[in-house]
Image (tube, rainbow, N blue to C red):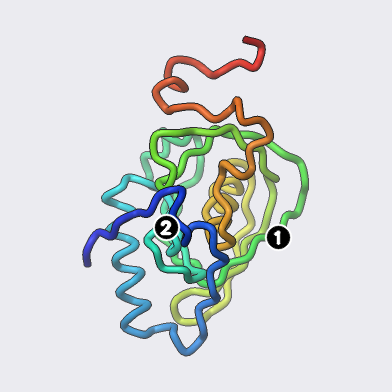
Amino acid sequence: MPVREIIRMGHPTLRQVARPVEREELGSEAILQLVEDMKETLHAAGGIGLAAPQINVPLRLAIIEIPDEGSRYGEIPTLPLTVFVNPGVEVLDGELAGYWEGCLSVPGLRGYVERPQHAIVRAMDLDGNPFEIELNGFLATVFQHEFDHLDGVLYVDRLKDNRLLVFEDMLAEGQPSLDD
């Protein structure tokens, strides 16, 4: 179970639309090994989500895990490590809220992105069983961010104002202002 290299913005795979995982691929050694490698890579990087394209595998597969120590992300519910095969997001309410997003493929930067805050995610598990999760608030943002990778979209593409893209250390000093 090796830790894979997380490719960074500028790599062409991050801009591709990933292909769906075929039903006959589920349960294969290749897919099971990919998921194990993704878990190891996510844990080594200290993130909460990883899409297969981020390790240069253009498949519609992602994992998300919200650990118990969610204080880094505020008051959000925990989520055990979950695999999402061929996920889709349906927005239930277009009301937007913004968060400072970061990404393992865009290291060192944060951007203020507004996204819908109420959605349903539909996906399959590794056995091909369909499931859905209804999401609100920051969790809705997390899932939309992660699944954007499957369509070749990075959070920087969703910035409404490029002045709200900053280095993480500058954000720690205080939120940037557009009044300067």
Quadrant of the image for the N terminus? bottom left
Q: Which mark is residue 142?
A: none
Residue 30 x/y as whole percent: 33, 80
Please tell me which residue is depicted at 44% across the width and 20% down the height of the picture: 170
With respect to residue 173, does 42 lie above or below? below
Residue 107 x/y as whole percent: 39, 40
Q: Quadrant of residue 173?
A: top left
**In the rendered structure, which amino acid carries the disc numbered 2?**
Gln
With respect to residue 179, does 65 lie above or below? below
Residue highlighted by disc 1:
90
Mark 2 residue element? helix
- From the viewer's perspective, tell me whether residue 86 is left or right of residue 3: right
- Front residue of 170 and 63: 170
Please tell me which residue is depicted at 37% across the width and 61% down the height of the picture: 55
- Front residue of 159 and 80: 159
Q: Quadrant of residue 141?
A: top right
Residue 76 x/y as whole percent: 51, 41
Mark 1 residue element? strand
**Marks 2 and 1: which is nearer the front?**
2
Q: Earlier in the sequence, mark 2 or mark 1?
A: 2
Residue highlighted by disc 2:
54
- Front residue of 47 and 7: 7
- From the viewer's perspective, tell me whether residue 2 is left or right of residue 180: left
**In the rendered structure, which amino acid carries the disc numbered 1?**
Glu
Quadrant of the image for the C terminus? top right
